[in-house]
Amino acid sequence: MLQERQDRKPFVLVLLDGDNTLFCDRYVQAGVAGGSEAAAALRDVIKTQLLQAKRFKQDWDICIRAYMNADGLARTYRRCGIVAGEDTFRDFVRGFNKAMSLVELIDAGDDKEAADTRIQKTFEIFYPNQHCKQLVLAVSGDRSYTGFLRPYVSSEGFEDRVSFVEALPFTRDMVDLTTSILKFRAPTLLRNDKLVVITQPSDSAASQSAPSTGTYATAVALQCQTIPAASPVTARAATLPAYGNTTQAFLPLRTSYSITRNAHGERIDEPVPSD
């Protein structure tokens, strides 16, 4: 009787860190249609890989929960030149969420490690759930999960129930931790590199060096460098900070004048000394 209850409504849970595990550009660029296609492709990849590993049955549901910083990713995709406007990324998210009832791309907000926290808490809830037959983690580029997962790896049944999707390369400590655990890739679906933000000449420090690498999609917009407010000019030359290889210097300015006038308000010039 107990076994019969445990066998009801079996499902696979996929947890994806959307700030680190990014879909290939063509899906994002296609907006709503790309989001719908990406969701279906991800579900198909998971199903195919688990079937090959004999870890899936046809009557099991596949639930996908992806967490991300939506505004941060939209800005980063635009700054990288992948999309012309941030609305294209938002359309991609809308299409992803419309694709299937058990697929969600959730905005976790812009708090640091917001996606990480939600994935870890969700894992904690569903790992002991007997109806959850498999847990698939797409978190390969973030080493913060290593410490969280270490206590679980040694628990009974972990290797049989948990698998990983590798997008960004695994960190060394994650490789060591998951040596005997099922891992697979989806190179035509998920990026295996970071987003690179192309900076403009007015951008801060990074503008004086090579293009900077975005911290996945959580990279905040780079701030433009501004000239500090001018202080009163003194008898010494006032010099602004150097930009690139150019230093701008300004000569001292005469800031006040003394003009002598007579009782009628007419200007009286100082006498010019004779030789």
Image (cartoon, helix red, strand yellow):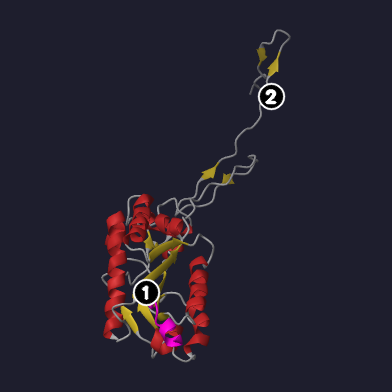
Q: Name which residue lies at 39% across and 74% down.
A: 14
Query: Which contiguous range is marked in magenta?
Result: 1-10
Q: Which residue is mark 1?
A: 168
| Residue 258 numbered mark, or none | 2
| Amino acid marked by disc 2 | Ser
Which quarter of the figure has residue 194?
A: bottom left
Q: Position of residue 157 (x, y in %)?
A: 44, 90
Q: Is residue 269 left or right of residue 89?
A: right
* Local secondary structure at mark 2: loop
* Local secondary structure at mark 1: loop
Q: Name which residue lies at 37% across and 50% down.
A: 87
Please tell me how many numbered marks the rendered image carries.
2
Farthest residue toward the top?
Answer: 264
Q: Position of residue 12 (x, y in %)?
A: 38, 77
Residue 39 seen in the current view = yes
Residue closer to the observer: 79 or 157: 157
Which quarter of the figure has residue 6?
A: bottom left
Local packing at callout 2 (Cα closer than 10 Å; few below 14, some 14-19, many 20+) is few
Residue closer to the observer: 135 or 225: 135
Q: Position of residue 76 (x, y in %)?
A: 40, 58
